[in-house]
Amino acid sequence: MTCSEVDLPRGDCSDCRGRKLFFSAARTIGPYRDTLRQAVLKAKHEMHEALATALGMRLAEAVQRAPLAVPPNLVVPVPMHWLKRWWRKTNPAETIALSLAKQLGLPVACQALVCRRILRRQATLTPAQRRENVRGAFRAGRWSSLTGKYVLLVDDVMTTGATAHEASRALLDAGASAVYVATLARSSADF
């Protein structure tokens, strides 16, 4: 995805409009570079969970500045495989989602999505490899009630949109009416 500076916060770019995506819209704080990039990289670590929380509040402000067609009524973080979460001792997407949900006054469902397998690190892959890496990787949690929900899916960075696309597919398959994506930063693929 290559979004212009104007289109970036809304997730409204020519590449997004030209692709069949399972999410309806995207919101972000800004481009994945400079100070925001450094903050996102730090927020991935347990010792910087306070930073991830603060970034979640900033992301909530970005969502409020650019309202979605139908307001979301549930926040869901992009999950990690349980073993990876255990190794890292944190899931930044979950920390961001909890903070954003509190700021927006929305419920959060951390168990609504499950990652079925350990995924390769997306940042090291080409766009085609990213799509293959996450294909079928997510499913709805066993006790999740998503029917009719307008879900705000939260992650730290969106590059090609492959993760958001596949996670959205699982949410829609479980009955969600629509899925919107909120990420701290957007990056274009440099391949």
Image (spheres, grey):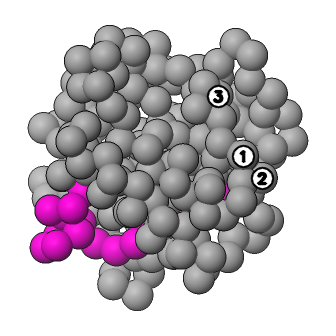
- Callout 1 environment at 10 Å: few (<14), some (14 to 19), or many (20+)? some
- Can residue 183 be seen here? The reply is no
* Labelled disc at residue 73: 2
The secondary element bearing badge 2 is classed as loop
Q: Position of residue 34 (x, y in %)?
A: 13, 73
User: Is there CB contact under 8 Å for labels 1 and 2?
Assistant: yes
* In-image side of 68 versus 189 (left or right): right
**Residue annotated with mark 1:** 107
Pointer 1 or 2: first along the chain:
2
Q: Which residues are magenta?
A: 21-40
Q: Is residue 177 above or below residue 101?
A: above
Q: Position of residue 42 (x, y in %)?
A: 18, 52
Q: Is residue 120 above or below residue 94?
A: above
Mark 1 or 3: the one toward you: 1
The residues tagged by marks 1 and 3 sit, at their Cα atoms, a distance apart of 12 Å
**Residue annotated with mark 3:** 112
Which amino acid, mark 2? Asn
Magenta includes 73?
no
Q: Is residue 185 above or below residue 113?
A: below
* In-image side of 149 versus 167 (left or right): right
* In-image side of 146 versus 141 (left or right): right
Which amino acid, mark 3? Ala
